[in-house]
Structure formats: C-alpha cells, structure tokens
Amino acid sequence: MHEDIEKVLFTPEQIQQRILEVAAEISRDYRDRKLMLVGVLKGAVFFLTHLAEALEVPVQIDFLGIASFSPGKALPGVVRISKDLDLDIHERDVLVVEDIVDTGLTLRYLLNILAGRQPSSLAVCTLLDKATRRLVDIPVKYRCFEIPDRFVVGFGLDYDQRYRALPYIGILKKDIYH
Ligand code: IMP
C-alpha cells in the first residue's frame, strides 16, 4: 500500500466484481438502444475503460473535459468545458460516466448542457457516490459504491493530479490532504 494511504476501501478485485454487476444491469437496460458512454476527464477514464469492456451491448465512447474556474474551492460547481465531445449526442442514449459524485454541482452543470443537445435519454453512472454530501438532487441511475465523507484516491481519482494510477481506491491520509 502507498505510504500516503490511510486505508484501502476497495481492492482491485472488489472494484472489478462490482463493475461486472453494474455492467450486467446496463447491458439489460440498454439492449437494442444506441448507447453512448460519455466519460468525464480525467478521473473517469479507468472506470469507463473497465465498464465498456464488461458491457454486452455495442457502445460509442466519447470524453468531455471540464476545468474548474476556481482551482481553490471558493466556487464549487463553477466549471467550464475544456474539451467538448467529438460526437453528436442528438437522439442517442447517453450515459454519463463519472468517477465520483460529491455535492452534485459539477454534474448538474454538465447534465444541463448535455440535455440541451437533445439526446434520446440521459442518465448517470458513477463509480463512487458520497451521497451524504449532496447539495443538489442528481438522478444517479447506476452507482458502484456509496462511500463515507472522506477524501479518496486511486482507480482514476486524484489529489493534485497524483495517485490516479493506484489500482485500488483508498482514503488519503489527513496530513496529505488539507
Ligand atoms: P461535486 O461537484 O461536488 O459533485 O464534485 C465533483 C468533483 O469533485 C469530482 O468529479 C472530483 O473531481 C472531485 N472530488 C470530490 N470528492 C473527491 C474525492 O474524495 N477524491 C477525489 N476527487 C473528489
């Protein structure tokens, strides 16, 4: 285990097992539909890759980059699109793939933008859900794990661009994360 990690929350095996279960649900729900996975950069890349591999329905994949206006946390949820989608989502069944939903503010902003492009359907699949921190109501259709209000890293999630490549999800030690 990395020395900055206080505790491993989910091992690679637990993550993979849960992704298989959620992928089976999605495959059932989206049979005969035009599914497009929209991954939010960069955190969702690891999750999206494993999820897409496990799906039993054909998918298109695209990515959306977002950047916070305020690198500090003064204005949470105030974001801008730093890389737009390459594909047209009009009349597609869009599943937004996120690494974590915390307050829900970022996702609310993204969902508003995507809804304006008139997809056939728009839903959210997240790896982690800090449901107790939610400030706005977000329709999360699929979630792998609900987690407590602690700062976590690994399997795509970062702190200051570090720890993304850890194969597990762990709680970051408090003296590292201020
Ligand atoms: P929200 O707008 O509050 O839902 O926060 C969304 C973003 O905050 C996520 O996409 C992450 O980038 C970041 N975030 C929130 N909690 C964590 C965490 O525990 N670890 C890493 N990033 C987090």
Image: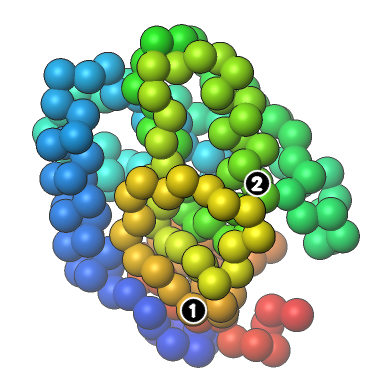
Q: Which residue is mark 2?
A: 106
Of all residues, the one furthest to the front in this rendering is 137
Crowd around label 2: few <14 · some 14–19 · many ≥20 (10 Å): some
Q: Could you tell me the amino acid type at mark 2? A: Thr
Q: Is tag 1's residue or tag 2's residue first in the polypeptide sequence? A: 2
Tell me the element at label 1. Answer: loop
Q: How many marks?
A: 2
Kindly report the distance in space between the C-alpha atoms of the residues bearing marks 1 and 2.
Answer: 19 Å
Q: Is residue 84 shown left or right of residue 23?
A: right
Image quarter of the C terminus: bottom right
Disc 2: residue Cβ within 8 A of ligand 1's nearest atom: yes
Residue pictured at 44% horizontal, 73% vertical: 147
Q: Do we see residue 162 in this rendering?
A: no
Residue pictured at 22% horizontal, 51% vertical: 22
**Which percent across, then down, holds residue 78?**
78, 45
Vertical order, 70 against 153 (above or below): above
Q: Which residue is mark 1?
A: 148
Q: Could you tell me the amino acid type at mark 1? A: Pro
Vertical order, 142 against 112 (above or below): below
Residue pictured at 19% horizontal, 35% vertical: 29
**Which percent across, then down, holds residue 123?**
41, 36
Do tag 1 and tag 2 residues touch (Cβ < 8 Å)? no
Residue pictured at 66% horizontal, 38% vertical: 109
Image quadrant assignment for residue 32: top left
Q: Is residue 88 shown left or right of residue 48?
A: right
Vertical order, 51 against 159 (above or below): above
**Which percent across, then down, holds residue 56?**
12, 34
